Amino acid sequence: MVENARPRMEIPPAQIGLSPNRLNHRMLAACISYALLLVAFWFVGRHFAIETHANWVSGYTAFTLLIAPYWFFGFCEVESFRRVLTNRAVRVLAPGVLLIPYLTFSLPRGEFRCIHALLLFGIPVGIAALFEFVPPGGKRPSPPKLYWQDVIALLLVGLPIEFGWIRRSFPGPEMSALPKLLLVDSALYAFLVVRGLGGVGYDFRARARDLLIGVREFGYFAPIAILLGLRIHFITPHAVAPPALSVLAALLVTLFFVAIPEELFFRGLLQNLLEPRVGYPGTLLVASVVFGLSHFNKPGPFNLRYVVLGTIAGVFYGRAWHDRRRVPASATTHAMVDAVWALWFR
C-alpha cells in the first residue's frame, strides 16, 4: 500500500505561535552558536592553511555573510519574515542583498565582473519573483506539492552547482563553497518565505533523535557501500589512518558545505514536494535516482559506478529524512558517509 500520509509530522512553530521569551531564547542560541561556528571555521582554515592564501580576509568576510542566512534560517520563525515583508516589491528584491558578499569578496581583489554580479543578483531575485507573481497552485502560501514553478526554481539552484556555472565568481579552490552557499540562501528564502513551503525540516535546534537516525542509516548503508565499492573498484582503503583533528575538520566541512545543502535540495525540497504526488516509497526512489544522476560527471563524462552508489546512498539519506522529516537527520548520515569515504578510502 502506498503511504500518502506524512508520518509523525510536527506542527511548525509558526502555526502554534511562540512566546516572546521562547523566541528571544531561540535567537540568543542562534547568535551564540553562529559565533562559535565562525570560530570553528577559522580554525579549520588554519588547519588547511587557507588563511595563508592571498586576501583571506575578504574571502572569510564573504563567508561570514553567506553563512548567516544559511544558519539563522535553521532557528527562525519563517512566518515573521512574511509579517515584515508585506510589500511585494520588497519581498522580491530582498534576496538581492546576497550580492553584497560577492562585492565584499571581489572588489578588494580587483576581480569584480558584471556578468557574475548579474547572475548572483538575478538568480535569487528571479526565483523569488517567480513564486511571488506566478505562485505554484495559483495562491500563496502555495500547496505543498510539486508544480512547474518548483521545477524551474530547483533547476535554477541545482544546475549552476552541478555544472559549476558560477564557480568563477569566487575563484580559487578554497572559495569553491561560496557560490553554493549563496544558492542555498536563495532557495531557503524563496521556498520558505515567498512560497511558504512547510515540512522541509530545515531546523538546526539540536535533537538527539536526529543523530540516532543518522547513525542508524549510516550503519545500514556502510556495509553495502564498502562491499560493493570494493567489488566494483570504486574505493580503495587508505594505508594510514587520519589524525583526529583531520577527522573533525573533515566532518565539519562536509556537513556544512556538502551534506546540509544537498539534503535540503534532494530531501527537504524535492522529496518533500514529490511525496503528495507520487507517494512514499515511490518518491524515495525518484529522489534517490535524481540524486545518483547528479553525480554522473564526478569525474566525467559519465561515472556509472558513482551514479549507482549515489542512488543507493540516496535511499538511506531519504529514509533518514523521512523518519522525522528533518534535514539534520539525513545530513548526519550523508556527512558520515562522505567523511569516511574521504578519510579512509578513495
Image (tube, rainbow, N blue to C red):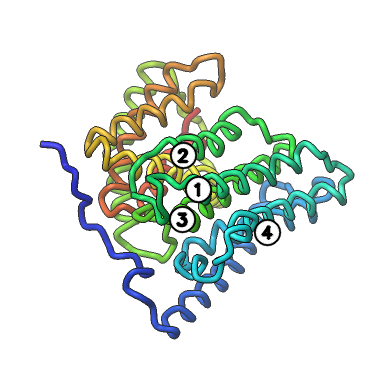
| Mark 1 / mark 3, whichever is N-terminal | 1
For badge 2, the amino acid type reads Gln
How many marks do you count on the picture?
4
> Where residue 325 sits in the image (x, y, percent)?
31, 52
Q: Is residue 328 visible?
A: no
| Mark 4 / mark 1, whichever is N-terminal | 4
For badge 4, the amino acid type reads Leu
71 lies left or right of 309: right
- Toward the viewer: 58 or 285? 285
| Residue that carries the numbered disc 1 in the rendered image | 131
**Mark 2 and mark 1: Cα distance apart in space:** 7 Å
278 lies left or right of 136: left
- Toward the viewer: 142 or 156? 142
| Residue that carries the numbered disc 2 in the rendered image | 149
> Where residue 271 sits in the image (x, y, percent)?
34, 40
* Few, some or many residues within 10 Å of mark 4 (<14, 14–19, 20+): some
| Label 2–label 1 contact, CB within 8 A | yes
Which residue sits at x=28%, y=47%? 322
**Mark 2 and mark 4: Cα distance apart in space:** 28 Å
| Mark 2 / mark 4, whichever is N-terminal | 4
The answer to which quarter of the image holds residue 146 is top left
- Toward the viewer: 14 or 142? 142
Q: Is residue 139 above or below residue 87?
A: above
The secondary element bearing badge 2 is classed as helix
The secondary element bearing badge 4 is classed as helix
The answer to which quarter of the image holds residue 115 is top right
| Residue that carries the numbered disc 4 in the rendered image | 65
Which residue sits at x=26%, y=42%? 276
| Residue that carries the numbered disc 3 in the rendered image | 192
| Mark 3 / mark 2, whichever is N-terminal | 2
* Few, some or many residues within 10 Å of mark 3 (<14, 14–19, 20+): many
Viewer-side label of 4, 1:
1
